[in-house]
Amino acid sequence: MSGKTDVENVSRLDGLKWLVVTLLVLAGAGGNVYFGGESVLYRTIGLVVLAVAAIAVAMQTGKGQSFWGLLRDAKAEVRKVVWPTRQETVQTTVIVVIVVLLMSLVLWGLDSLLGWIVSSLIR
């Protein structure tokens, strides 16, 4: 029974946290307009502080924690990737360049042939 109460409290608090995030973002936008005559450095510092605060509050929500878990899982998956060696990368790049050049020659030749055929039919 306490588990259900915890879930209900979290969902209520999540709504409040998202409201705080929204208010922080709006405060940043409004403050940037209101203090338009101030130095860009001071406005930037203020926006960065508000952005960090908004992100910190957003990360405390259920969706924020899920997002953080997704980032951790993605980092673990990137570590599992077998990256190609330098030689494999160079060989693949050379093959791609050669195929692109050959296809461009084929398409240029086909375009020239079709252009010659159409021009001869029009005359």
Image (tube, rainbow, N blue to C red):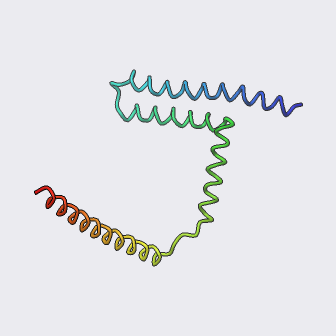
* Quadrant in which the C terminus is drawn: bottom left
37 and 83: which is toward the camera: 83
Check the image and report above or below for 19 versus 110: above
- Total marks drawn? 0
Check the image and report above or below for 60 versus 35: below
Check the image and report above or below for 46 versus 68: above
Residue at 65% across / 38% down in the picture? 63
Check the image and report above or below for 35 versus 100: above
Residue at 54% across / 37% down in the picture? 52
103 and 26: which is toward the camera: 103
Residue at far left of view: 123
Residue at far top of view: 34
Task: Indicate the position of residue 21 as horizontal and vertical percent values.
Answer: 57, 29
Horizontal side of 81 relative to 10 (left or right) equals left
72 and 83: which is toward the camera: 83
Residue 81 position by quadrant: bottom right
Horizontal side of 83 relative to 13 (left or right) equals left
Task: Indicate the position of residue 10 as horizontal and vertical percent values.
Answer: 74, 31
Horizontal side of 6 relative to 90 (left or right) equals right
Task: Indicate the position of residue 32 as horizontal and vertical percent values.
Answer: 41, 26
Residue at 39% across / 23% down in the picture? 33
87 and 92: which is toward the camera: 92
Task: Indicate the position of residue 111 as horizontal and vertical percent values.
Answer: 24, 62
* Quadrant in which the N terminus is drawn: top right
Residue at 61% across / 54% down in the picture? 74
